[in-house]
Image (tube, grey):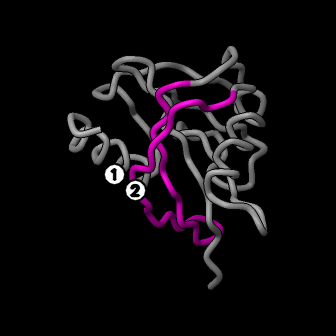
Amino acid sequence: MKTHECVSFIILNEAKVLLERRSEEKETDPGLVTIPGGHVEDGETRIQALVREIQEELDVTPTEYKFLCSLYHPTKELQLIHYFIVSGWNGEIKPYEADSVEWHTLESAAVEIAADKVALQELERVQTFL
């Protein structure tokens, strides 16, 4: 099975994280609450994909970001998701591909895919070092 590389962005605003409710029309994980992200395109670096996906999905440009971890997410395809923490951006966040986006505390961030849960646990675990 081919592995599809993806990026996801944990956007932090002080102690809150931005989560999305995916559109019911999405091929993978329709209607679920997740950390926003998307596929890395052929010939693109992970950073290029991060910037492009944030602009496409939320109409903002990241200015401060750090790599957090990479996790597999088996769905209709096998995804290897590279998670980034985004703590600075230019622009006003607007959902373009998700049904909605909302800010949640880490404790109340009820994501609905296992890889996202692990990524948020990893963020909590290493947060004081970042």
Q: Are marks 1 and 2 in contact (CB under 8 Å)?
A: yes
Instruction: Check the image and name the residue furthest to the bottom.
Output: 1
Q: Position of residue 63 (x, y in %)?
A: 58, 30
Question: How far apart are labels 1 and 2 at the CA level?
Answer: 10 Å
Going 48% across and 19% down the picture, which residue do you hit? 103
Q: Which mark is residue 53?
A: none
**Mark 2 neighbour class, 10 Å CA radius: few under 14, some 14 to 19, many 20 or more:** some
Left or right: 106 in relation to 80: left
Position above or below: 78 against 114: below
Q: Earlier in the sequence, mark 1 or mark 2?
A: 2
Q: Can you say which quadrant of the picture contains the C terminus?
A: top left
Magenta residues?
A: 61-88
Give me the disc on residue 118.
1
Helix, strand or loop at disc 1? helix
Query: Which secondary structure dominates the residues rendered in magenta?
Result: strand
Nearer mark to the viewer, of 1 and 2: 2
Q: Quadrant of residue 120?
A: top left
Q: Amino acid at mark 1?
A: Val
Up the image or down, 14 lies above or below 120; here it is: above
Can you say whether 79 is above or below 83 in the image?
below
Q: Position of residue 104 (x, y in %)?
A: 42, 21
**How many numbered discs?**
2
**Is residue 68 in the magenta section?**
yes
User: Which residue was labeled with disc 2?
Assistant: 69
Verify whether residue 32 appears in magenta: no
Q: Amino acid at mark 2?
A: Cys
Looking at the figure, which quarter contains the N terminus?
Answer: bottom right
Percent x, y of residue 98:
70, 32
Q: Residue at x 60, y 24 (%)?
A: 89
Is residue 64 or residue 114 the one in the foreground? Answer: 64
x and y percentages locating residue 44 in the rendered image = 74, 62
Q: Secondary structure at mark 2?
A: strand
